Image: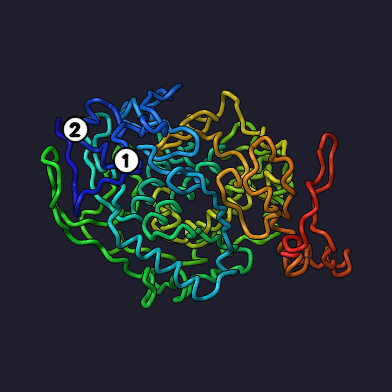
Amino acid sequence: MAVRLLLASVLVGSVSAQFPRACAHADALKSQTCCPVWERDGSACGEKSGRGSCQSPAGAQAPRYSGRDFRMAWPSTFYRRLCFCKGPFSGFDCGECQEGRWGPQCRRRHLTVRRGLHEMSRAEQRRFVERLVLAKSTVSRRYVILVSRNTSDAGSAKFRNASVYDVCTWVQYMAAKPIRTKEEPNFAHMGPAFAVWHRRYLLFFEREMRHLTGDQEFFLPYWNWTLSPTCDICTDGLMGRNGPSGALLPPSPFANWELLGRGSEEGVSAAVTVIPPPLQTLCTYDGGDEDNFHLLCPGPTAGKTLLTRNPGGDRRAARLPPASDIWKCLQLRRFDSFPFNQYAPFSFRNSIEGFKDASHPGRQMISLHNQVHLYLNGTISQVPVASNDPIFMIHHAFIDKILEDFLRADSRRLEMYPTHQRVSHGHRPNDYMVPFLPLVRNIDYFTYTINFAYTYTNAAYTEEDKFSSAANLDLIPRWRPFYQEWFLKYGVSRAFGGKLGRGLAGRCGGCSPPAAPLTRRRTRGDPGPGPQLPAAIASQ
């Protein structure tokens, strides 16, 4: 079996990835088993300690279109037995803790609060940028990435090292690459899983950054792009400014992210063939050969390995979306609708994804999420490789915040994930998300963020609510939706702009903030708002 691993650094024992190092070898692929031994008790998946066991996944999804596309039956092309962890434990060997837990027995709890990039001090912003650069310039000790041209035969699989950041880019590419054509849903877009897949992706990114930095307080900030019609974070001090050609300019560290050179081959297993070319960044997607998953550049050629942006250069998106578009999108009552793709009318998911006009959700138009990608007009505008640009992460954190606003507005929305037979493969509620391991299902992430131990600034949680069980989530106070936050801070006229803003401002006479936090209007069958907030929280 010609399994080859392309390495640029020393192998280490800690594993937790789409393809953990402990499972990227001939024996694991031949037996189709990824159940690493937990080093603390010497048993697979930490079974002796009650942390987990090695099992076959139930209800694995079957291929539909192409036997060459391993994603269609994820993960059975590679592994049919994996670690399934119990209780608060997680990871490939069940040696880690679930989100929000830490300590030897994962008994300690911690709530992460994601803040807006604009809310952070300059020192905090600078530290965030420095950590992104660190992720780009550090080989992942936990991951290898698949670079095989032929994905139909696991026996010929090839893996190689990548930086921590490029591993995350690889994950997004694997899900966003077209299945048949660009006009049909892939595993992360144009369907109900759009919101939940990216929610899982951001949690994955945060976890890897915490492993890299050793900082359990690390959080991914969100970019509130409604604060300016132009890219106010495209500056030397933040995400970098571009020149006339679109290339980012010094002194921004993103102008030319360091390419990792050839590393040591010491400690490599004799069962692995080492191929030592230098590590390179992921290429720009060219749209050809849909069955080709070999997305590594042949070399650091201009125009392929460097990030580009030209904000406002695409006539389809001359400016960033206004706050009023979010407000209109949040008025939609259905999470998704038939035919559950980019043509779904009156669908919150399709409107926030940006295929429908927020003002007229039955009309096809570029808006919101898609509008931001197109406005930046560069690497981030090419779907499969968009996450090469670090703005991708903070942009999607804001989309995730808006999703939480939508779910919080009415607890009955937690039951709205579509189960219709027309929902595309990969977007059905019980489909496994591609290419995540441990296995997770779409429906697992269609819930409140507090279930994953994180929230956003201005969320109305009390101390007692922080770690409520799913059964008690109805007791969590409703929090002010985004558009109300912005309205209270800046006023209706500026928030909505134009005639709409001036008209609303005139009607409410200045709209002074109410004494108590805003809550939604009750409807029939609605349990109403949760308990009153403590003054310290209500004043945020």
Q: Which mark is residue 26?
A: 2
Q: Earlier in the sequence, mark 2 or mark 1?
A: 2
Q: Position of residue 457 (x, y in %)?
A: 63, 60
Q: Residue furthest left?
A: 270
Crowding at dot 2, Cα within 10 Å, few <14 / some 14-19 / many 20+, comes out as many
- The answer to whether residue 89 is left or right of residue 470 is left
- In this view, the residue in front, 404 or 103, is 103
The amino acid on which the numbered mark 1 sits, given as a three-letter code, is: Arg
In three-dimensional space, the C-alpha distance between marks 2 and 1, rounded to whole angstroms, equals: 24 Å
User: What kind of element bears circle 2?
Assistant: helix
Q: Position of residue 321 (x, y in %)?
A: 62, 60
Q: Residue at x 27, y 56 (%)?
A: 139
Query: What residue sits right under mark 1 in the picture?
Result: 40
Q: Is residue 266 above or below residue 80?
A: below
Q: Position of residue 233 (x, y in %)?
A: 52, 70
Q: Which mark is residue 195?
A: none
Residue 65: name its quadrant: top left
Q: Residue at x 54, y 68 (%)?
A: 231
Q: Is residue 487 visible?
A: no
Crowding at dot 1, Cα within 10 Å, few <14 / some 14-19 / many 20+, comes out as few
User: What kind of element bears circle 1?
Assistant: loop
Q: Residue at x 40, y 73 (%)?
A: 244
Q: Position of residue 333 (x, y in %)?
A: 73, 40
- The answer to whether residue 481 is left or right of residue 372 is right
Quadrant of the frame with the C terminus: bottom right
The amino acid on which the numbered mark 2 sits, given as a three-letter code, is: Ala
- In this view, the residue in front, 301 or 126, is 126
Query: Dots 2 and 1: beta carbons under 8 Å?
Result: no
Quadrant of the frame with the N terminus: top left
